[in-house]
Image (cartoon, rainbow, N blue to C red):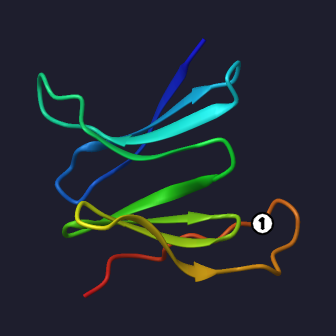
Amino acid sequence: MRRWLAFGFGSSGQPIVYIEDPSAGRAEIWLTGGPGSLGTLVTASTQLFIGSPQGDRDRIWFGGYTGIYLYTTSHGLQKVAAFNDLQAQESVAPAGVCA
């Protein structure tokens, strides 16, 4: 059974949705589209755990257990900062929009 969670907003106010399928061990993050549109798949993974989305113009920043990630429609999701020395249950998050 899939579980859906709206957990943030893009810079244009569109919801960012986390979809988890525990039976398949898979999760997806979607930037929703308008009426009648499925939206854009940001990432689908069994190992990448990111959250804390922060919309910034045409970009979306995500924090996580291993670093900071940047999503753009032209380049997709990319890791832009790595953190290898975090303690258990610690994560990083973007602090706010960039100028």
Looking at the rendered structure, the secondary structure element under dot 1 is: loop
Count of marks, rendered view: 1
Q: Residue at x 70, y 64 (%)?
A: 65
Q: Residue at x 78, y 79 (%)?
A: 84
Q: Which residue is mark 1?
A: 90
Q: Residue at x 39, y 63 (%)?
A: 54
Locate the C terminus by quadrant: bottom left
Residue 23 image offset from top left, x and y in percent: 70, 18
Q: Quadrant of residue 58?
A: bottom left
Amino acid type at circle 1 is Glu
Mark 1 surroundings within 10 Å by alpha-carbon count, few (fewer than 14), some (14 through 19), many (20 or more): few
> In the figure, is residue 33 to the left or right of 91?
left
Residue 1 image offset from top left, x and y in percent: 60, 11
Residue 33 image offset from top left, x and y in percent: 19, 37
Q: Which residue ends up furthest to the right in the rendered image? A: 88
> In the figure, is residue 32 to the left or right of 85?
left
Q: Residue at x 19, y 70 (%)?
A: 57
